[in-house]
Amino acid sequence: MGDKKEKRVTLQDVAKDAGVSRATASLVVRGSTSITEQTKQKVLASMNKLGYVYDRVAASFRSRRSSTVGIIITDIGNPFFSELLANLQDRLDELGYTTLLGMTFESESKQERILETMLEHHVCGIIMAPVAGTNPAVFARLKQLNVPCVLIGREISGARVDYIGTDFQWGTKMAVRHLADQGHKHIALLGGTPHTSAYNERLAGYLEGLEESRIPTDQRHIIPGPPTRESGAVIINQLIRQDKLPTAALCHNDIVALGVIVGLRENRLVAGKDMALVGFDDIKEAATANPGLTTVAVGSGQWGIEAANLLHQRISSETQAPQETARIILPPKLVIRESSTHFMGVH
């Protein structure tokens, strides 16, 4: 008679022997750095004692998942996203994940194809800056597939999904108050994609700021447009063609503001002197621009860290029960530079 076949040692056996959860043991064998050294050594000792061998291929087949996170953004050409990505990928790497990156360029069809490709590669979670008008059914499907998702910068109405962002409304109101305190009575709002949460919140803050500063609203001074450098140059030319140029402008983001600076220069006008400017985001280029750009800092790097931590929490959760969605709002900060303090026409 042949010898009785030995029972294969499972990860559950290792977890029980080490006195930890199966999820913790799994993180150790996947090389995650989020586990303390003491816990790691306990799990490794149990693996050695029991003779456990981690079969990655079998594990992937069983879960139909990988340790890969999908990241979807609109455009890496925007320095805001490149700065966010640097911190996001560093933190995901510390947590033991690899990443797949896709760019939508604000195209819903591209976003759909990217999502399908990531799901085919069995990503264990997704972090995304969604395209304007994204159907909330997208996130219902991800939930059905048990693929956690964290949105950054834009919320989608009707989608029950985790979100990381800033208080755009308060940040914009701070900027309007700053310009009003400088004596400005004609303040424009330039750039941004209408009907997105980020735009609507900025618009609300702008209107509230004008009302609180007793400045009448002029609809001609509200000009939306793509949040790009090229758009900023086009928009300022539209504004210049009006009867009277506003003395100040609040731009949807720093990239639009930098485009406005170029557009003003092409018209022999000087940003900061002929028109005060405020941006949004505080990308690195804002500090080195000429003039230095006053802006609302939102902490893009911290967005990345918070998004990675939240997604990891969702992936590592042992409970299958429905969880309350998280909405993490980081406080904005006004950073004052020359573009809003050297205006010649008010003082």
Image (cartoon, helix red, strand yellow):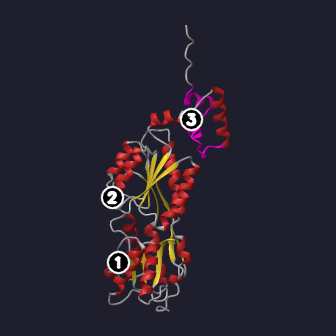
Q: Is residue 255 above or below residue 130?
A: below
Nearest to the eye among marks 2 and 3: give it.
2
Residue 309 at least partly seen:
yes
**Residue farthest toward the top in the current orientation of the protein:** 1
Q: Which residues are magenta?
A: 9-36
Q: Are marks 2 and 3 in contact (CB under 8 Å)?
A: no
Residue under the point 38% across and 53% down = 114
**Residue farthest toward the front in the current orientation of the protein:** 2
Q: Which mark is residue 222?
A: 1
Is 110 part of what is drawn in magenta? no
Left or right of 48 on screen, residue 316:
left
Near mark 3 (Cα within 10 A), the count class, few <14, some 14-19 or many ≥20, is some
Give the Cα separation between the discs numbered 3 and 1: 55 Å
Q: Amino acid at mark 2?
A: Glu
Q: Which mark is residue 21?
A: 3
Q: Quadrant of the N terminus?
A: top right
Q: Amino acid at mark 3?
A: Ser
Label 2 sits on residue: 108
Residue under the point 53% across and 73% down = 285
Q: Is residue 310 above or below residue 345?
A: above
Give the Cα separation between the discs numbered 2 and 3: 40 Å
